[in-house]
Image: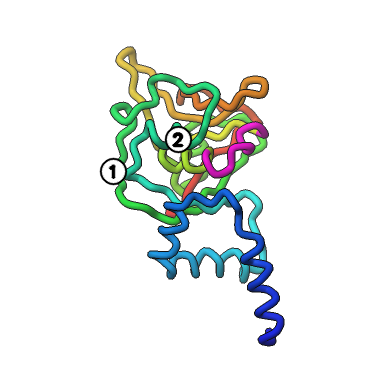
């Protein structure tokens, strides 16, 4: 690439930056330029772009209530709390969420086995909430399930968070793990 081409390209990149970039996220990129370099390289240099992969900055230290507020959901299940969904992760991380679609009804066990075969792990609540905040329209297209965060109910059933819709409302709900997931569901996953 010539110097002139590079300058023209850099100008287009600067003009293409989103106006609504979160100032804390921007500061995170400033403080971790190497992570930004890796993300840009993976997006701009890769020969094939996976349209099912979404790049995020996840703050695992952010209280669940704040992460929910950032998503501006129209309805939230009241059981989705810090107490019910603690995380073992800490700090901020650059994460690529892949939305895996099976194109058929599948059980939770089938999903977990297939994700493992692909070198993926299911997304946890903080990752799912970051996805919902950064890409709010995705959940209007299809339900997005986060299988890594599980609420064990006192009466024995287990539930996990999912992003979905009801009419035009964006919802953060809990769904039972014991069900077969519908053909339209996408499963949020992260490379191991």
For the question of whether residue 117 can be seen, the reply is no
* Secondary structure mostly seen in the magenta stretch: helix
Q: Which residue is mark 2?
A: 147
On whether residue 101 falls in the magenta region, the answer is no
| Residue at screen point 42% across, 48% down | 58
Q: Residues within 10 Å of mark 1 (few under 14, many from 20)?
A: few
Q: Is residue 175 above or below residue 126?
A: above
Would residue 90 appear left or right of 67 to someone viewing this image?
left
Q: Secondary structure at mark 1?
A: loop
Of 83 and 8, the residue lying toward us? 8
- The image position of residue 79, as x and y in percent, is 38, 21
Would residue 61 appear left or right of 10 to someone viewing this image?
left
Q: Secondary structure at mark 2?
A: loop
On whether residue 138 falls in the magenta region, the answer is yes
| Residue at screen point 38% across, 47% down | 59
In the rendered image, the residue lying farthest to the top is: 155
Q: Which residue is mark 1?
A: 88
| Residue at screen point 68% across, 73% down | 9
The quadrant holding residue 103 is top right
| Residue at screen point 53% across, 38% down | 132
Magenta residues, start to end: 133-141
Of 120 and 141, the residue lying toward us? 141
Q: Residues within 10 Å of mark 2 (few under 14, many from 20)?
A: many
Tell me the mark number nearer the camera, choosing from 1 and 2.
Answer: 1
Name the quadrant of the C terminus.
bottom left
Q: Earlier in the sequence, mark 1 or mark 2?
A: 1
- The image position of residue 124, as x and y in percent, is 41, 39
- The image position of residue 54, as x and y in percent, is 57, 50
For the question of whether residue 8 can be seen, the reply is yes
- The image position of residue 170, as x and y in percent, is 58, 27
């Amino acid at each position: 690439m010539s110097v002139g081409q590079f300058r023209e390209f850099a100008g287009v990149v600067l003009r293409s930056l989103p106006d609504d970039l979160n100032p804390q996220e921007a500061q995170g990129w400033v403080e971790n330029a190497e992570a930004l370099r890796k993300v840009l390289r993976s997006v701009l240099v890769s020969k094939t772009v996976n349209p099912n992969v979404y790049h995020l900055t996840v703050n695992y230290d952010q209280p669940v209530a704040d992460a929910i507020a950032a998503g501006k959901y129209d309805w939230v299940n009241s059981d989705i709390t810090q107490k019910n969904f603690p995380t073992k992760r800490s700090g901020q991380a650059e994460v690529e969420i892949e939305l895996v679609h099976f194109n058929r009804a599948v059980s939770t066990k089938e999903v977990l086995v297939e994700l493992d075969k692909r070198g993926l792990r299911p997304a946890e609540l903080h990752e799912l909430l970051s996805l919902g905040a950064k890409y709010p329209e995705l959940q209007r297209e299809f339900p997005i399930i986060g299988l890594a965060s599980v609420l064990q109910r006192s009466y024995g059933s287990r539930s996990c968070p999912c992003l979905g819709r009801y009419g035009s409302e964006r919802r953060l709900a809990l769904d039972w793990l014991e069900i077969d997931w519908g053909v339209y569901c996408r499963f949020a996953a992260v490379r191991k």
